[in-house]
Amino acid sequence: MVPVTSTAPNPPAAGADPAIVAKGYVHPEVLVTTSWVADHLKDPKVRILESDEDVLLYDTGHIPGARHLPRGQLELRVDTELPDPTVRILTCCEFGKISTLAAATLRELGFLRVTALDGGMQAWRDAGYPLESGAGG
């Protein structure tokens, strides 16, 4: 997410991770940390979407279990890819910028339980978490 900060301190956002709140984002509640994602990798109630437009980024390494749904195709494919609007969705991309746009779009389309990975795939790799490679999602 683009770090949009204000001069006034943000009140703590309900449900926001304190590590993300400390960064001064305007809406920290829409982001999750790499450790949150790692803790929910096997959670069947969480869908992970890789929203980068470049399929090569997905093919060379993505979060295990993630599906590739490019940001530019969300509106076209969301009904077939995500038929249940109550599911928890995590969006991610290389640096965490495109995924915040994807998350905002999904919320506008009625998916209210959408978050984005703070720092994107770069943060995931830097933290040493596992990757899957190859096409699949």
Image (spheres, rainbow, N blue to C red):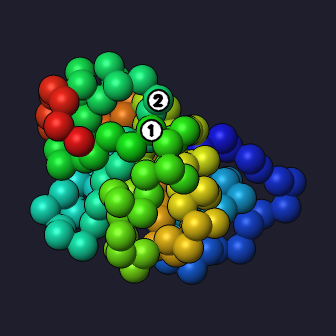
Q: Residue at x 71, y 74 (%)?
A: 11
Numbered disc total:
2
Q: Which mark is residue 57?
A: none
Q: Residue at x 66, y 54 (%)?
A: 25
Residue 116: x, y in percent?
Answer: 47, 53
| Quadrant assignment, res 22 | bottom right
Residue 64: x, y in percent?
Answer: 17, 44
Marks 2 and 1, the one that precedes in the sequence: 2
Q: Residue at x 35, y 49 (%)?
A: 49
Residue 132: x, y in percent?
Answer: 15, 34
Is residue 31 visible to us here? Answer: no
| Left or right, residue 86 beside residue 100 | left
| SS label for mark 1 | loop
Give the residue number, with chain letter if any, for mark 2.
53
| SS label for mark 2 | loop
Give the residue number, with chain letter if any, for mark 1.
70
Is residue 25 visible to us here? Answer: yes
| Left or right, residue 12 beside residue 33 | right
Viewer-proximal residue, 94 or 81? 81
